[in-house]
Image (spheres, rainbow, N blue to C red):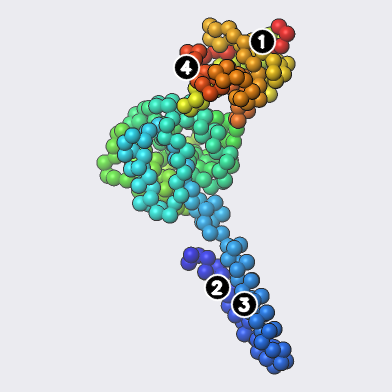
């Protein structure tokens, strides 16, 4: 609030000057109370417009106000609440968005997928604090990275940034070594979410210079997941089921919807699919309710990838699928 009024002070003085002098001028010319009220009303409008136009914080102010927080901690104990408390103690006014705390335990790939899916919907300046850290306390590095979209990532250097880097690019990376940005004199070897990642995220959100967190690292030195890419050839497409979609049991693949459409299938057609050692035909449709209850379907999901589901059921449970599983779809007519 102090910042808002300090920015408005010159304008308020100016409005006061013109309001006072304008009122005197009107009095001299005998234009009456009506004109004086009009001038005062105009002055108030100018002030209100100025207040609206002054940034109130967030991504356009001195510091970003949003931290997006993701872990594989679950919500059965106090771990998430403790980390949030650390952030609030450093920056009480920060806004914390819980992306999820139900990442499959130890699954760096799932963490990378969720980060990839969420980041496009947040503005530049947002701070992402991610703790999926199966090798916590080892020689793996704790880092801060800045993407070319201007977002900040506070996380272990274990591959979580792989998909974001492929799409957005990484502008710079620093290893977290500055103990002033951490909490406690004796850091836990098993709870870096509390002692390192949470306080660093809050310091960043508070607008502190991220280059003081520690020494610069080469972007090329980042740990990256070794992900298989879908392969399209004259026979068809070879891909992989990489995950299931939350509690619903839908299959998530690494097959881009546009590549699938190159195979020549139209919605409403049966698509022959080889899923691991199982061969089956699945109808290609637009959405779940396009097939009868309990029936399987193949669709392009909200991320633009090919998915497989059972209408109001779990594909993974019904067909016993546990990722990763190889997937092959031939070209139409073959």
Disc 3, SS:
helix
Residue drawn at x 69%, y 89% is: 32
Q: 66 or 222: nearer the eye? A: 66
Picture quarter with the C terminus:
top right
Residue at numbered disc 1: 330
Disc 2, SS:
helix
Residue at numbered disc 4: 317
Residues at badges 4 and 1 in contact (C-beta under 8 Å)? no
Query: Which-is-in-front pick, marks 2 and 4?
Result: 4
Q: Earlier in the sequence, mark 3 or mark 4?
A: 3
Report how far apart the C-alphas of labels 1 and 2 lie in the structure.
69 Å
Query: Which-is-in-front pick, marks 1 and 3?
Result: 1
Residue drawn at x 61%, y 25% is: 289
Dot 4: few (<14), some (14–19), or many (≥20) neighbours within 10 Å?
A: few
Residue furthest front in the image: 293
Query: Which-is-in-front pick, marks 3 and 4?
Result: 4
Residue at numbered disc 3: 15
Residue 94, position as x, y percentages in the image: 44, 51
Residue 241, position as x, y percentages in the image: 54, 18
Q: Earlier in the sequence, mark 2 or mark 4?
A: 2
Report how far apart the C-alphas of labels 3 and 4 lie in the structure.
69 Å
Query: Which-is-in-front pick, marks 1 and 2?
Result: 1
State which quadrant residue 200 falls in.
Answer: top left
Residue 58, position as x, y percentages in the image: 52, 53
Query: Which-is-in-front pick, marks 4 and 1?
Result: 4
Residue at numbered disc 2: 9
Residue 99, position as x, y percentages in the image: 47, 38
Dot 2: few (<14), some (14–19), or many (≥20) neighbours within 10 Å?
A: few
State which quadrant residue 275 falls in.
Answer: top right
Report how far apart the C-alphas of labels 2 and 4 lie in the structure.
65 Å
Report how far apart the C-alphas of labels 1 and 3 lie in the structure.
73 Å
């Amino acid at each position: 609030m102090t910042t808002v009024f300090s920015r408005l002070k010159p304008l308020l003085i100016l409005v006061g000057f013109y309001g006072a002098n304008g009122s005197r001028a009107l009095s001299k010319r005998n234009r009456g109370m009506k004109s004086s009220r009009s001038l005062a009303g105009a002055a108030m409008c100018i002030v209100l417009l100025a207040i609206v136009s002054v940034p109130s914080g967030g991504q356009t102010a001195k510091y970003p106000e949003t931290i997006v927080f993701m872990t594989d901690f679950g919500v059965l104990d106090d771990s998430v609440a403790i980390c949030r408390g650390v952030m609030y103690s450093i920056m009480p006014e920060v806004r914390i968005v819980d992306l999820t705390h139900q990442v499959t335990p130890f699954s760096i790939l799932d963490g990378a997928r969720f980060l990839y899916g969420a980041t496009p919907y947040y503005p530049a300046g947002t701070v992402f604090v991610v703790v999926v850290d199966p090798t916590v306390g080892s020689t793996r590095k704790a880092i801060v990275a800045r993407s070319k979209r201007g977002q900040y990532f506070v996380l272990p250097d274990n591959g979580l940034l792989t998909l974001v880097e492929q799409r957005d690019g990484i502008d710079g990376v620093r290893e977290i070594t500055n103990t002033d940005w951490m909490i406690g004199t004796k850091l836990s070897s098993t709870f870096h979410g509390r002692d390192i990642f949470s306080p660093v995220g809050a310091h960043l959100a508070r607008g502190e210079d991220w280059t003081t967190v520690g020494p610069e690292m080469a972007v090329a030195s980042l740990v990256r997941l070794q992900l298989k890419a879908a392969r399209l050839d004259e026979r068809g497409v070879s891909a992989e089921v990489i995950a299931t979609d939350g509690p619903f049991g839908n299959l998530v693949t690494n097959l881009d919807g546009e590549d699938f459409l190159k195979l020549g299938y139209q919605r409403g057609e049966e698509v022959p699919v080889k899923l691991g050692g199982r061969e089956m035909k699945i109808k290609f449709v637009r959405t779940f309710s396009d097939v009868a209850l309990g029936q399987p379907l193949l669709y392009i999901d909200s991320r633009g990838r090919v998915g497989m589901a059972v209408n109001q059921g779990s594909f993974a449970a019904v067909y016993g699928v546990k990722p990763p599983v190889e997937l092959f779809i031939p070209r139409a007519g073959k």
